[in-house]
Amino acid sequence: MSIGHGEKRDAHLKFIRRCPCCICGGEPSEAAHVRFSDAKTGKVSAVGQKPGDEWTVPLCARCHREGPQAQHKSGEYGWWMAHRINPIELARRLFAVSPDIERGESIARQARRLAPWRETA
C-alpha cells in the first residue's frame, strides 16, 4: 500500500534525504525511487507510473543521477545487482523505522550486508 500525499509522505522523504548514500556513504542524499517490480516481494509498479514514496532509498546526486556510473545512466535492476544491494529490502527496512534517523543512518550504512543480492540459478 502506498503512503499518500501530505505530511506523512513529506516526512518520509525528508527522513530518506537525511540518511547517507547507501552506495558511497556521501551526503546529502536524494530520495531515489525503486521503479522495477519484484513479484517475489510483492512490489508491483505500473509501467510509466512513479512508485509510492515508501519505495525510496538514499543515494547521493553522484550515485543517483550525475556521476558517470550513476543509477539513472544504466539499467536500474542491473545497477543494483552490480552493487549487491537489494533496494526493495532496503526501502522496506527504511520505511519501517522512518522517521528514526539514527536507525535509518545505520540501515543505510549497512545496506550491503542487510540482504545481499545474489543471482540464483
Image (cartoon, rainbow, N blue to C red):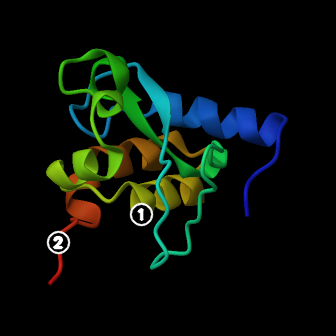
Left or right side of 121 for 77: right
Instruction: Look at label 2 and name its amino acid.
Output: Glu
Instruction: Look at label 1 and name its amino acid.
Output: Glu
Q: Quadrant of the C terminus?
A: bottom left
Residue 18 in the image: above or below residue 97:
above
Q: Is residue 110 visible?
A: no
Q: Quadrant of the N terminus?
A: bottom right
Task: Identify which residue is drawn at 34% across, 45% down.
Answer: 76
Residue 13 lies in what quarter of the image?
top right
Task: Give the SS element for disc 2.
Answer: loop
Label 1 sits on residue: 89
Of callouts 1 and 2, the N-terminal one = 1
Label 2 sits on residue: 119
Task: Identify which residue is drawn at 56% across, 74% down.
Answer: 42
Count of all numbered marks drawn on residues in the image: 2
Q: Nearer the viewer, residue 91 or 19?
A: 91
Where does the image place residue 90, in percent across and percent down from the top left? 41, 56
